[in-house]
Structure formats: C-alpha cells, structure tokens
Image (spheres, rainbow, N blue to C red):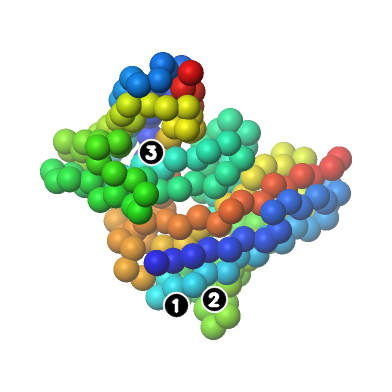
C-alpha cells in the first residue's frame, strides 16, 4: 500500500494565524482526501483534493477556511486559516488509487490553538 | 448521502473470547465496506474490507460479513488478544460518493488479559 507522509506531526498555534499541512504519497494516486478527527470522535471528511482543480468540500466546510491544493498526483496541502480554539483537532490526509479501492491514512497532524 | 451507524460504542471482552461489532448503512447502492483499527495516537489502519459482491471475507482471526438485503455488515474477531484493544471504525462508500468514505462512530474494544 502507498506510504503517506504528513507534516507537521503536531503544532501549537496562536489564535488568528494560519497553518499549512503537507501530505506526500510515495506513489501516484487517483484520489486524496482530508479529514478532521476531534478528540474521542470519528473521522469527518473535510474535502476531496482534486488534482489540477478546486477541491470539493463537504457540508460545513468552506474554501476560505480550509483552502486545499493538489498540484500533482502525489502531493496535497490543507491550510487551516484564521484559527480559533474550535479548530483544535487532528487533521488526517488519505490516499486511494481508484474508486472503491483501499484508502490509507497518514499519521495525522495534531493541532492545538491557544 | 450515506449514513453509517455503528454498535456498540464500547466493548469489553476477556482474552480469548470473540468480539463482534455491527454497522448499518443507509445507501443501498453502497459497494465497498472497509474496517479500520486505530490505536491511541496513531493513524487509522485498514484491517479488512469487503465488496458488495461478497458475503464474507476472512483473514486469520478477523472476518467481515455483509448482508446487503438488511444493509448491515459486521466485524468478527476471534481469540482476542490484549493487542486487539483499540478503536475500530467501520465505513462505507456510497453509490454516488466518488470514493468518499462515511465512517461509523467507532467502537472502543478493550481485551482484558
């Protein structure tokens, strides 16, 4: 399966700042996704990162708050903008090579906002 | 869209016993059902999956069964060991969701030595 590297692994940020999380896959994949996992909770899909076009956001998530880039088939970034304490969470990227294929996750970024 | 319900939320068993976690889904067109194990502070790890054209799949001590008519699928772990203790998530890909996973709420499994 694809190896997915995510960085930073954790960060502590000040309110009102922005942080960009990087996700690198060791092989070309069709699909990349970004999830949020709040402490003790399940995973919630933020958006699908589309290569060469704008990301597709799920209900409750907007581009201004969570801009996403995907310049090629192995790399994506998620920015958490104008952060508030409510954004404290784990952010995970995942990769999948085709519909209905196994989806694998990076180690996640643990984000704390002061 | 797809909705996945998972039960129980917590499950405690003695080492060597079996554990069963059940999930139901809403979209009859869903066709792929993975299970993930997440240990504390680690990534969700795919442990087994099943497609809609298969009723059962087994991999050593773990198995998954799928009932398309009833729209539910289950994870079975036999001969549980303390290292099986983790949070388990079921998920489903809906018929028109283009690969997007919808997760269940998770089950905290504790295996007592």
Q: CA distance from mark 2 to mark 1?
A: 7 Å
- The residue lying at 57 percent from left, 69 percent from top is B24
Q: Which mark is residue A93?
A: 3
Residue lying furthest left in this view?
A52
- The residue lying at 83 percent from left, 55 percent from top is B17
User: Residue A56: percent from the left, percent from the top?
Assistant: 25, 50
Is the residue at mark 3 from the same chain as the one at mark 1? no
Picture quadrant where residue B57 is located: bottom right
Is the residue at mark 2 from the same chain as the one at mark 1? yes
Residue named by callout 1: B28
Residue named by callout 2: B71
Q: Secondary structure at mark 2?
A: loop
Q: Is residue B32 left or right of residue A48?
A: right
Given residues A100 and B5, the one toward you in this image is B5
- Image quadrant containing the N terminus of chain A: top left
Chain letter for the residue marked with disc 2 in the picture: B
B70 relative to B76, above or below: below
- The residue lying at 45 percent from left, 48 percent from top is A44
Q: CA distance from mark 2 to mark 3?
A: 28 Å
Q: Residues within 10 Å of mark 2 (few under 14, many from 20)?
A: some
Q: Is residue A49 left or right of residue A94?
A: left
Q: Are marks 2 and 1 in contact (CB under 8 Å)?
A: yes
Q: Are marks 3 and 1 in contact (CB under 8 Å)?
A: no
Q: Are marks 2 and 3 in contact (CB under 8 Å)?
A: no
User: Residue A15: percent from the left, percent from the top?
Assistant: 40, 20
Q: Secondary structure at mark 1?
A: loop
Residue A26 visible at all:
no
- The residue lying at 66 percent from left, 51 percent from top is B107
A37 relative to B70, above or below: above
Q: Residues within 10 Å of mark 1 (few under 14, many from 20)?
A: few
Q: CA distance from mark 3 to mark 1?
A: 27 Å
């Amino acid at each position: 399966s694809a190896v997915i590297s995510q960085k930073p692994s954790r960060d502590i940020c000040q309110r009102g700042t922005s942080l960009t999380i990087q996700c690198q896959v060791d092989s070309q994949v069709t699909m990349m996704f970004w999830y949020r996992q709040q402490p003790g909770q399940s995973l919630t899909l933020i958006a699908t990162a589309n290569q060469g076009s704008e990301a597709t956001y799920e209900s409750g998530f907007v581009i201004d708050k969570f801009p996403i880039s995907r310049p090629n088939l192995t790399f994506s970034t998620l920015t958490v903008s104008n952060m508030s304490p409510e954004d404290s969470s784990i952010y995970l990227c995942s990769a999948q090579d085709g519909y209905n294929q196994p989806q694998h996750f990076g180690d996640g970024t643990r984000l704390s906002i002061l | 869209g797809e909705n996945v319900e998972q039960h129980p939320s917590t499950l405690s068993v003695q080492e060597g016993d079996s554990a069963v976690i059940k999930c139901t889904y809403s979209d009859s067109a869903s066709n792929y059902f993975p299970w993930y194990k997440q240990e504390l502070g680690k990534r969700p790890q795919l442990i087994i999956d099943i497609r809609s054209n298969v009723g059962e799949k087994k991999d050593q001590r773990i198995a998954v069964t799928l009932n398309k008519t009833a729209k539910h699928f289950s994870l079975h772990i036999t001969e549980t060991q303390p290292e099986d203790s983790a949070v388990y998530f079921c998920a489903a890909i809906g018929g028109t969701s283009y690969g997007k996973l919808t997760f269940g709420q998770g089950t905290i499994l504790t295996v007592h030595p």
